[in-house]
Image (cartoon, rainbow, N blue to C red):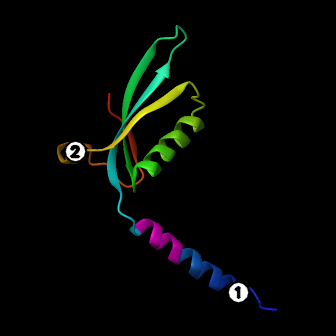
Amino acid sequence: MSKFCRLDADKRESAKEVTRDAKMQVPFVTTVSFADRDGSAIHLQYGVSAGNEREARSELERRLLNQELYNYSILEVRRATSSEAQSLALPAGAIRLLN
């Protein structure tokens, strides 16, 4: 039987955090369609800083659900152009409403 050392667990967790933080975050532009009460659609764009498209979509969905927004559809997730990325200047893990 092996003993579990809390210090070893802390070291492993620290190593995982460094690995996660070391992953490059890039800006994505997402288009989300929201249905209003009349049934018409409202399209909003968000800038999302993430490691890849899947992560950008997941983080946006997580934040929308945390705000209890359910009548939405993510229409597009694309990598920001270089000029968009420069103007967005998103820090890692950030999401910003663009319009």
Position of residue 83 in the picture relative to residue 46 (left or right): left
Decide: is 23 above or below 70.
below
Q: Position of residue 45 (x, y in %)?
A: 36, 31
What kind of residue is marked 1? Cys
Farthest right residue in view: 1
Which of the two discs, 1 and 2, labels the residue nearer the N terminus? 1
Instruction: Give the vertical position of 1 relative to 70 (above or below).
Output: below
Query: Residue 19: within the magenta?
Result: yes
CB under 8 Å between discs 1 and 2: no
Amino acid on which disc 2 is placed: Thr
Find the magenta span and give its range.
Answer: 15-21
On the picture, is 98 further left or further right than 5? left
Label 2 CA crowd tier, 10 Å (few <14, some 14–19, many 20+): few
Give the CA separation, mark 1 to mark 2.
47 Å
Quick one: 58 or 95, which is closer to the camera?
A: 58
Q: Is residue 21 left or right of residue 12?
A: left
Residue at the bottom extreme of this rendering? 1
Residue at image x 46%, y 51%?
A: 55
Q: Position of residue 75 (x, y in %)?
A: 42, 31
For label 2, the residue is 81
Residue 11 position in % (x across, y down): 57, 82
Q: Position of residue 13 (x, y in %)?
A: 58, 74
Q: Is residue 31 magenta?
A: no
- Depicted 13 relative to depicted 33: above or below: below
Closer to the camera, 50 or 66? Answer: 50
Q: Could you tell me which residue is drawn at 56 percent across and 24 percent down?
A: 71
Q: Quadrant of the C terminus?
A: top left
**Helix, strand or loop status at disc 2:** loop
Question: Residue 5, labelled with which disc?
Answer: 1
Q: Is residue 93 above or below residue 45?
A: below
